């Protein structure tokens, strides 16, 4: 059985490498296992990824990340939120932050890079979406899942924090799935020292994006959000966010299906709750 499993992983790795090669993407692939046992083509939340030298597409159990060694931050992190993931079994306390084992340590920001900078180590995929197991909780504390965020945005009462809470509460209450993609918005092709932590480490974004898709009674609803470091947030359609960041979100869905929920901000219980409780402009 172990030999068969090894061969399956090798075969899947080769298939993924061939797929990416056909797309002409010079990225490094770290393929540990299919996320939640799914095939690549079945990962609903998977976005497109940039043609970036030094980029790394990493499939962890709890999320998929496209990490940029050039900027020292993820360009996007994508995951599915479901009832199993958010059950209150594993607490976040006692976890530090760890280098992502799929990447060389030298390509990642470390805890000292954040010290006395005025920026938090901001989770993209949040801890409260990963209480289902110790493995999920540890993964979400990898450096590849972090970007510099001001405490006003990241901590209790901040708009980023509030949206995370609204999403988790909705899944716990309604038992429905959410598909989420978020990351920093890269606004500079070249960086000065003042745009990096300690002048040399991770890129300090001015803005972040988050897109959410909810399936409810056979209907898909979508919402895009753009945040700045000063705790302001605006709602946009997913298409508007795509135009800002250059990624095709939910790329595994047919274009006609994407059109149904990406062209306007959806109206369902979750998105009404975000508008009401998350201090949206």
Image (cartoon, rainbow, N blue to C red):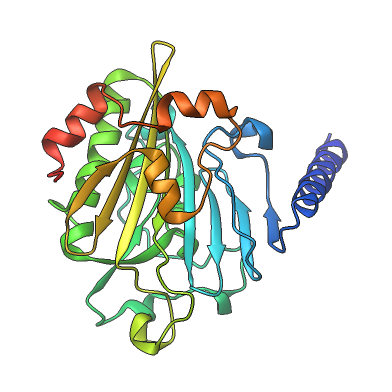
Give how far across and how far down residue 261 sits, in percent. Answer: 41, 27
141 vs 108, nearest the viewer: 108
Question: How many numbered marks does the figure carry?
Answer: 0
- Picture residue at 81% right of the left edge, 38% below the top: 5
* 65 relative to 163 in the view: left or right: right
Residue 278 lies in quadrant:
top left
- Picture residue at 35% right of the left edge, 52% below the top: 209
* 193 relative to 34 in the view: left or right: left
Tell me, yes or no, if residue 51 can be seen here. yes
Give how far across and how far down residue 141 sits, in percent. Answer: 42, 58
Give how far across and how far down residue 117 sits, in percent. Answer: 26, 81
Residue 97 lies in quadrant:
bottom left
Give how far across and how far down residue 83 sits, in percent. Answer: 39, 26
- Residue extending farthest to the top is 217
Tell me, yes or no, if residue 82 can be seen here. no
* In the depicted structure, whether residue 270 falls above or below residue 141: above
Residue 178 lies in quadrant:
top left
The N terminus sits in image quarter: top right
- Picture residue at 42% right of the left edge, 66% below the top: 186
* In the depicted structure, whether residue 47 falls above or below residue 198: above
- Picture residue at 42% right of the left edge, 75% below the top: 202
* In the depicted structure, whether residue 22 falls above or below residue 131: below
* In the depicted structure, whether residue 243 falls above or below residue 115: above
6 vs 81, nearest the viewer: 81
């Amino acid at each position: 059985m172990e030999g068969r499993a090894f061969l399956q992983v090798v075969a899947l790795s080769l298939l993924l490498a061939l797929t990416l090669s056909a797309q002409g993407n010079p990225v490094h692939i770290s393929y540990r296992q299919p996320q939640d046992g799914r095939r690549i083509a079945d990962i609903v939340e998977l976005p497109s990824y940039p043609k970036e030298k030094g980029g790394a597409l990493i499939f962890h159990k709890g999320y998929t990340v496209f990490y940029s060694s050039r900027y020292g931050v993820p360009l996007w992190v994508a995951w599915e939120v479901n009832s199993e993931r958010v059950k209150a079994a594993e607490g976040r306390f006692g976890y530090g932050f760890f280098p992502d084992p799929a990447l060389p340590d030298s390509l990642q920001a470390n805890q000292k890079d954040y010290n006395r900078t005025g920026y938090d180590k901001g989770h993209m995929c949040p801890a409260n979406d990963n209480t289902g197991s110790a493995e999920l909780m540890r993964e979400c504390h990898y450096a590849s899942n972090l970007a510099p965020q001001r405490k006003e945005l990241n901590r209790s009462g901040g708009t980023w924090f509030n949206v995370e809470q609204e999403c988790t509460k909705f899944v716990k209450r309604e038992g429905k799935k959410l598909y989420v993609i978020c990351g920093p918005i890269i606004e500079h092709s070249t960086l000065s020292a003042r745009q990096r932590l300690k002048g040399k480490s991770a890129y300090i974004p001015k803005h972040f994006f988050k897109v959410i898709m909810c399936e409810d009674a056979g209907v898909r609803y979508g919402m895009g959000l753009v945040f700045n470091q000063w705790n302001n947030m605006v709602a946009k359609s997913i298409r508007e966010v795509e135009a800002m960041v250059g990624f095709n979100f939910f790329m595994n869905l047919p274009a006609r299906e994407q059109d149904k929920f990406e062209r306007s901000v959806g109206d369902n219980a979750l998105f009404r709750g975000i508008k009401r409780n998350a201090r949206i402009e």
